[in-house]
Image (cartoon, grey):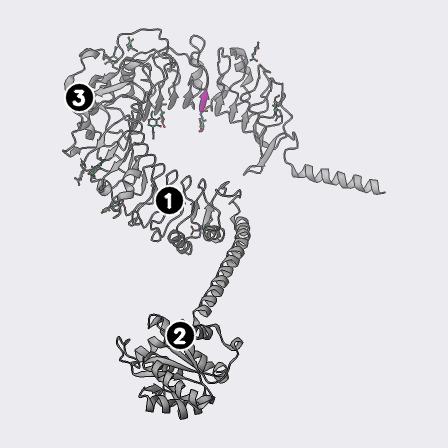
Amino acid sequence: MATLDILFFMVAVIFIADADDPCKFDSRCICVNTKTNFLKATCARKNLTTIPCIPKNIESISFTNNEIENVRKDAFQYNSILLYLDLSTNKINLMNSEAFVGLQKLETLIISNNNISFTVFTSKTVFKPLVSLQYLDIKHNPIHQVAFILSLSNLQTLKMDYAEGETYFGPEYNTLRNLTSLDLSGYSGHCKMKILTPRTFENLPNVEHLDLSKCQINLILNGTFKTLSNLTYLDLSDNRCMGLRAFVNMTYDLFSTSIKILRINKIRQTFAVNTEILKCHLQHLRNTTITELYMDSNRLQLLEPGALNMLPKTLKKISAGDNQFTYGRYILHLSVLSNVQELNVSYMGISHDYLDKDEDCDIVSLDNSLCDKDFRHNINDINKNDYFQTPSDDVPIPLNVPYKLRMFHYRRCDMRYKLPAIYLLNNSLEYIDASFNALYDWQGPFHNLHNLKYLDLSNNFCSNVSKTFFNGAPNLTSLFVGNNLLGFVLPNDHTGDTFSSLRMLQTLDLAYNRISNLPISLFKSQKYLRTLNLSGNMLENVNFEIKHMANLYFVNLSDNRISILDVSFTNQINHLTKNLPNLTIDMSGNPITCTCDSIAFIEWLSTTNVHLNMHQQECYSIKMYLNNSKAGYDMLRKKCSSYMTTVVAVVSWMVIFVMILSAGLLYRYRWKIRYLYYIVKSKHQGYIKPLQVDNDFMYDVFISYADEDDTFVHSKFLKRVEEDGNISCCVHKRDFIPGNDIASNITSAIHNSRKTVVIMSQNFLSSDWCLFEFNMAKMESIYSRSSENIIFIVFIEQLPSKDLSLNILEIVQSKSYIEYPNDEYGDVVFWEKVKDTLSM
Ligand SMILES: *[C@@H]1O[C@H](CO)[C@@H](O)[C@H](O)[C@H]1NC(C)=O
Ligand SMILES: *[C@@H]1O[C@H](CO)[C@@H](O)[C@H](O)[C@H]1NC(C)=O
Ligand SMILES: *[C@@H]1O[C@H](CO)[C@@H](O)[C@H](O)[C@H]1NC(C)=O
Ligand SMILES: *[C@@H]1O[C@H](CO)[C@@H](O)[C@H](O)[C@H]1NC(C)=O
Ligand SMILES: *[C@@H]1O[C@H](CO)[C@@H](O)[C@H](O)[C@H]1NC(C)=O
Ligand SMILES: *[C@@H]1O[C@H](CO)[C@@H](O)[C@H](O)[C@H]1NC(C)=O
Ligand SMILES: *[C@@H]1O[C@H](CO)[C@@H](O)[C@H](O)[C@H]1NC(C)=O
Ligand SMILES: *[C@@H]1O[C@H](CO)[C@@H](O)[C@H](O)[C@H]1NC(C)=O
Ligand SMILES: *[C@@H]1O[C@H](CO)[C@@H](O)[C@H](O)[C@H]1NC(C)=O
Ligand SMILES: *[C@@H]1O[C@H](CO)[C@@H](O)[C@H](O)[C@H]1NC(C)=O
Ligand SMILES: *[C@@H]1O[C@H](CO)[C@@H](O)[C@H](O)[C@H]1NC(C)=O
Ligand SMILES: *[C@@H]1O[C@H](CO)[C@@H](O)[C@H](O)[C@H]1NC(C)=O
C-alpha cells in the first residue's frame, strides 16, 4: 500500500515537473514564453549532434554552437509557425534537399559557419519552401555557386560569402526585389572581389545597405555604384589595395546614390607613405548627401587648402582617427565644415603592429594618392606652405572651430604641449576628449567654452594646472583628470581657486594623481557634485568639506593610505546621510587600522548609515575582515574593554600610591604646613608684622601652658618675670585677640614673641592645644629664626622621660630647660635663672 502511494506521488511529481517545464522535447534546451504565447527555445552550446523533434508551438529556436552534422529530411515538417531558426556554428555538411520543408513562415534563417557546399542544385531546391524568408545568413561556408530561385522574393537581408569567379550576381538576383541589405564582409566570412565593375551590382538595384569591408578590392571601375540609386550605407573599409585612386573612381558614382554613411577606413596599406588629401580627391563628394564619413587609418597627414571645401555641407560626423595629421593651415579652415557636429581625430600617435602584413595587391597601380587628372606634385615635396608653426606660448591663439561642432575626440594623439590660452570663437563644443596625450601643463584658460559639459584630460602627465584654467567652461558637468600628476599642485590650493568656476560639476575624477592631501576648501563650489573619485592617490586622511554637496552619491576613496578618517569628515558624512540615503563611500584597499585608538572610527564604520564598499577589506593591524564591520567592531570592543580594565587598574593604583605618598608627606610635614598656613593667614590678616630683624618683638615671651596650670603662670610666673623682671609676656587668656581663631592667635603670638616658654607638666602633655603650641614654636625656630632655639622649657613637675616626645627630649638635651624646685632657696635661683634666660 505504502509503495503504491510513493509511486503515485512520484508520478504526480514527474507530471507536475513536466507540465512546468515548457521545453518538453529536449531537457537541454531553455524555453521562455513569447508575447504571442508561443515558445522561444535556446539550445546553444549543448553538444547536440542531431536536431531533436521540435514541437509545433515553438516560434523561435537556436541551435548555435553545437555538433550537428546534418539536417535530415522533414526535420521541421510540423513547424509551420516557426519564424526564427539559428543553425550557425555547427558541423553541418549534409543538407537534405527537403530539409526545410514545412517552414513556410520562417523569416530568419542563420546557417553561417558550417561546412555546407552549396551548388546551384542544392540551393534551388533546399530553399524553395522558405517563401517568407526575409533574412538569410549563409556566411562562412565552403562556398560554391549559390543561385536563388524566385521563391525568396521577400528576402530583405542577405549575408553571404563572395568568391571571385564563382559568385556572380546574375539575372536571377533580379527577382529579389525586396533585397535591401547585402553583407559580403570578409570580417564574418570569405570575400574576394578584386575588381568591381558596373556589372557587379547591376542586378541588385534596390540595395540600400552594402557592406564590402575586407573584400580585397583592388579596382573600382567607373559606374560600379551608379545604378544603386537607393544606396544609403556603403562600407569599403579594410580594402587596403584600393588606395585613394579607386576611392576617387568610386566617388564619381556617389552623386547618383542616396549615400548617407560612407566608410573608407583603412583603404591604404598599414605602412603606406603618409599622404596629403588633395582637392581633387574629394571633389566628387561635394554634391553628395553624405552625413557620416569614416576615414580612419589611412595614413593621412595634410589637407590641401581648400580640400575641406569639397566635403558636402550635409556632413555631420567625420571620423578620421588613426591618421598622422600634422599642424597645417587647414586647421584655420576647419570652420567651413559648417554642419559637422562630431569630429574624431583620435589615435594619431598610435603605433601599428609590424606583423600587420600588407595586403597582396594584384594590380600595382601608380602611386595611390594622386588624382588621375591632377599630377600636382610628388610626395617628397609636399607644399611647405601647408604647414604652419606650432603655437607659441604667450600669444593666445584664436581658434575657429566649426560652429556646430559638439563633440571633439582627440584621444591618444601623442601631443606634447603646454596648453596655452586659447580663444575659441563662436562654438557649440559640449564634449572634448583629449585624454592620453602629454599635455603636461594646463595654463589656459580656454575662453568661451560656455557649452562644454564633458571634458576628459586624463592620462596626460600634467603636473601643473593654473587657477584660471577651467574659468572658460562654467557649465562643465563631467571632468575627468585622472592619472595625471595633480598631486603636485592641488595640495597648495588652499583658497580652492582651481575648481571654483565649475559650479555645475557633477562628476569629478581625480584618481591616480599622487595626491597626498587636499585643502579643506578645494571643492567649495561643487554644490551639485554627485561622484567624486579620489581612488589610487596617497591620501592618509581626508578632511575637505563635502557637507554642502546636497546631491552627493558616490565618493571613491579606495586604494589610498587611509588608516582612519578624520572626525570632521565622518561628521559631515553623518550630516549628509540624513538627506542622502544612497550615499556610497568606497573605502576598499586602505590600510585601515583596528586598534583601541581607532575604535571610535571602527565604531563609526559599523554604525554609519552610509553605504560602505569595503570589498575584502582587512584590518591592517590585526587579521580581521571589515566586510562585516559590526562583528569586527564587537570583537575590537571586547579586546579594548580588557585593555581598558588594565588601564583603569593601573591608573587607580597610581592614584592610590600618590595619595598614600602625599598623606605620608602631609603627615611628615604636618607641623610645617600648619605653621606656614597660619603664618601666611596671619600675615594676610595683618596680625603679624614682617619678621623682625633686631630685637623689636611685640613680646619677649610667649607662655605656653595648660589651662590646669594657670595658677602657676598667673600667680607666680607673670608676677616674678613680668612685674619683677620687666619682661613682657604673652598669655593666651590675657593677650589673644578675641574673635580670632585660636590657631592663628597662637601662631602670631609665637611669631611675635622673641621666645616661647613651655610650662611643662602632665597636663601640658595631655593637651592638644599645648602640643600644637609647642610644635608651632619649633617650626618658628626652624623656619623663621634660622634654627635659633627659641623654646625654653620649665618643668613644674617631675615627668618620666618615657612620656616626653622626641622633640621635647631634643630640647631637654640642648639644656634649654629648667626644673621648678620646691624649696625656697631654689625658688630664688630658679626665678633669677628664668629671668636671665628670657632677657638674653
Ligand atoms: C560538450 O563537450 C565538451 C567536450 O567534449 C565538454 O567540455 C563540455 O562540457 C560539453 N558541454 C555540455 C553542455 O555538455
Ligand atoms: C567539410 O565537408 C567535407 C565534405 O563535404 C569534408 O570532407 C570535410 O572534412 C568537412 N570539413 C570539416 C571541418 O568538417
Ligand atoms: C516586398 O515586401 C513587401 C512588404 O514589405 C511585400 O508586400 C512585397 O510583396 C514584397 N515584394 C516582393 C517582390 O515580394
Ligand atoms: C528606392 O526606394 C523608393 C522608396 O523607398 C522606391 O520607390 C524606389 O523604387 C527605389 N528605387 C529603386 C531604384 O529601387
Ligand atoms: C578607375 O576607373 C577607370 C575607368 O573605369 C579604370 O580604368 C581605372 O582602372 C580605375 N582605377 C582604379 C584605381 O580603380
Ligand atoms: C568616370 O566617369 C565620370 C563621369 O561619371 C567621368 O567624368 C570620368 O572621366 C570617368 N573616368 C574615367 C577614368 O573614365
Ligand atoms: C555640383 O552641383 C552643382 C549644382 O548643383 C554643379 O554646378 C556642380 O558642377 C556640381 N559639382 C560636381 C563636382 O558635380
Ligand atoms: C575615434 O577613432 C578611433 C580610431 O579609429 C576609434 O578607435 C574610436 O572608437 C573613435 N571614437 C569614437 C568616439 O568614435
Ligand atoms: C556664430 O556663428 C553662427 C554661424 O556662423 C552665427 O549664425 C551666429 O550668429 C554666431 N554667433 C555669435 C554669437 O557670433
Ligand atoms: C552656460 O553658462 C552661462 C553663464 O556662465 C549661461 O549664460 C548659459 O546659459 C549656460 N549655458 C548652458 C547651455 O547651460
Ligand atoms: C605652474 O603654473 C604657474 C602659473 O599658473 C606658474 O607660476 C608656475 O611656475 C608653474 N609651475 C611649474 C612647476 O611649472
Ligand atoms: C535610493 O536607491 C533606491 C533603490 O536603488 C531608489 O529607489 C531610491 O529612489 C534612491 N533614493 C534616492 C534619494 O536617490
Residue 478 locus on image (x, y percent): 32, 41
Q: Which residue in the rendered view is the most extreme toward the front?
A: 825
Q: Give the SS element for disc 1.
A: strand
Q: Which of marks 3 and 2 is nearer the N terminus?
A: 3
Q: Is the magenta stretch mostly helix, strand or loop?
A: strand
In the rendering, which numbered label is found on residue 190?
none
Q: Quadrant of the C terminus?
A: bottom left
What residue is shown with label 1? 531
Q: Nearer the viewer, residue 444 or 169?
A: 444
Q: Nearer the viewer, residue 164 or 125?
A: 164
* Image region (quadrant) for ligand 2: top right
Q: Does the magenta stretch include residue 157?
A: yes
In the rendered image of this protein, does residue 381 appear above or below residue 601?
above
Q: Give the SS element for disc 2.
A: helix
Q: Counting other residues with Cα less than 10 Å from the Cα at mark 2, is it few (<14), some (14-19), or many (20 or more)?
A: many
The image quarter in which residue 85 lies: top right
Q: Calculate the distance from the C-alpha at mark 3 to the C-alpha at mark 1.
A: 43 Å
The image quarter in which residue 104 lies: top right
What residue is shown with label 2? 778
Q: Counting other residues with Cα less than 10 Å from the Cα at mark 3, is it few (<14), some (14-19), or many (20 or more)?
A: some
What residue is shown with label 3? 387
Q: Which of marks 1 and 2 is in front?
A: 2
Q: Which of marks 3 and 1 is nearer the N terminus?
A: 3
Q: Earlier in the sequence, mark 1 or mark 2?
A: 1
For the magenta stretch, what is the residue range?
156-160
Q: Can residue 301 be seen in this view?
A: yes
Q: Which amino acid does label 3 sit on?
A: Tyr
